Amino acid sequence: MVTEDDLPRPKRARLQPPVLDLMGVEELCEYIVELQTEIARVEAEIARKQHHRSAADAFFRKPPG
C-alpha cells in the first residue's frame, strides 16, 4: 500500500522571475541586490545546517577500537 509519505514531493515554485525588459537600469541593480541578499541568507542557512550535521555526526560517532 502506497501512502502520501511514499510519493515524491512536488517541487515548490521558487522565485517568480520578473520580466526584465520592463525594468530600468536602476531597478535591475536593485533586483541584483535583492537576489544577492537572498543568496547570502540561503548560504548562511546551509552553513548552519552543515554545522549541526557535523556536530551530530561527531556526537554519534563510535569510539575507535
Image: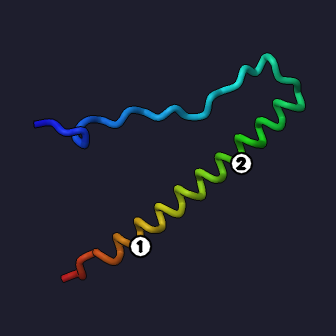
- The amino acid type, in three-letter code, at marker 1 is Ala
User: Can you tell which quarter of the image residue 25 is in?
Assistant: top right
> Residue visible at 46% across and 62% down?
50
Q: Residue furthest left?
A: 1
Residue for point 25% across, 35% down = 7
Give above or below for 28 relative to 60. Answer: above
The reply to whether discs 1 and 2 touch (Cβ–Cβ < 8 Å) is: no
Considering the numbered disc 1 on the image, is that residue within a helix, a strand or a loop? helix
Q: Position of residue 16 (x, y in %)?
A: 62, 29
Mark nearest the camera among 1 and 2 is 2
The residue pinned by badge 1 equals 55
Nearer to us in this view, 63 or 51: 51
Give left or right: position of 58 versus 30.
Answer: left
Which residue: 70% across, 40% down?
Answer: 35
Q: Which of the 4 quarters of the picture holds residue 14?
A: top right
In the displayed image of the protein, which residue is found farthest to the top? 21
Which image quarter is the N terminus in? Answer: top left
Residue 8, x across and y down, in percent: 30, 35
In whole angstroms, how far apart are the C-alphas of marks 1 and 2? 27 Å
The numbered dot on residue 37 is 2
Q: Please state if 58 lies on the left or on the right of 50 as rendered.
A: left
